[in-house]
Amino acid sequence: MRHLPSVLAIAALAASAPAQLASYSQFGSGCGGTGASSYYELFNGGNFDLSNLTPGILHLWNGTTYAVVPAAGPMYMPTGTPITFGDDQVQTISLPFPVPTTVGTINSIDVCSNGYIWLQTNPTADYTPSVGEFLSQGPRFCAAWHDLNPSSSGGGAMYAETDPATGKFVVCWENVPEYPATGANTLQVAFDPSGNVEFRYGNCTFAGTGLVGYSPGNNGADPGPMDISAITGFSLGTGIPHLALVPVTRPVIGQTAISQTRYIRPGSLSGVARYGVRAPSPISLAGIGAPGCDLLVPGLAGVPFATAGTAANNPLPIPQIPGIAGVVLDMQSIVLSPAANALGVALSNGVSYTINVN
């Protein structure tokens, strides 16, 4: 830690912002994992913006997981006999062909009246969407997990049939109201033999809490919410999170600011927290064997830390020097991790500290 006072002195000369309360923020993104295995958006109080979304969301199977792109096909008009569903009910429905998924090849699905589909046998018909349950329970596609009621006297029906024009198997919620009998919501989930899965949306009037997304379950890491209506395409990983640097306490003069490096992979050799001023632009390490990794803080000083566990604290003593009030100091963690990539390094996101007396 002997280099840190000199780092702060240099940073003080460059500081131009007026003094303010001690604070921190995060910037950039980490690397070294395989990426989140789930994605979702949580809707509250009628802000559902996927009604009549065109095109819908395509989950493109790649043999291991999914690429998610806005490329679903058009809505299908069901012609078969409706399936009688009660409120908060799950029914097992056979698929007309085997479908490869993250849990192996399946021949049936468990469809819930509340807008989601389990990929394994699961009788849970939950009508209260939550991120915790979405990530911790079994694998499922949530086209619109809401408190839907297809048994309402207000109308609506559910179908599950093969589209003769495309050969896809389509599960349909047609004008299904929210409980007890509010509004009308039309959405579809389509499966094809190659493993691709589509979310399609007709007119939806959702007013309550809802969740849209995909999760393999099994207590995967929370990737945070996203704006699904604005996606241009991304790939899901297999659930090993990227290295992350999380601020814990503020950088108050005379105290110790603590951040924590998280998601250190097993077999990692060592780590270093780099302190300095962030680069004007991220420095990509893709060309030397670390795709997706950016050096964010070139660094004036480095403090090593142990990587025996999955997380490590990074304490930063702030000197009792009033003159450093308002100084901004940036940091980034780097871990030697042979499993991360060809270069054998994982880099975290950045943390920016603004030092002050309070």
Image: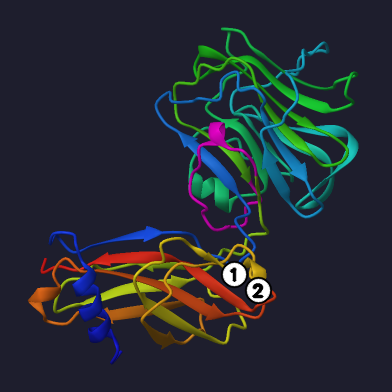
- Residue drawn at point x = 50 percent, y = 25 percent: 49
- In the shown orientation, is residue 269 left or right of residue 169? left
Whether residue 122 is visible, yes or no, is: no
Left or right, 57 with respect to 328, comes to right
Q: Residue at x 56, y 73 (%)?
A: 346
**Residue 225 belongs to the span the image colors magenta:** yes
Give the labeled residue for mark 2.
288
Magenta stretch, residue numbers: 215-233
| Main SS category, magenta section | loop
305 w.r.t. 91: above or below? below
Q: Nearer the viewer, residue 243 or 197?
A: 243
Q: Residue furthest bottom?
A: 2
Q: Residue furthest top?
A: 154
Secondary structure beneath label 1: loop
| Left or right of 352 on screen, residue 195 | right
**In contact (CB < 8 Å): disc 2 and disc 1:** yes
Residue 285: which disc? 1
Name which residue lies at 68% across and 38% down.
69
Question: Looking at the image, is 242 positioned above or below residue 102?
Answer: below
User: In the drawing, what numbered circle is on residue 46?
Assistant: none
Callout 2 secondary element: helix
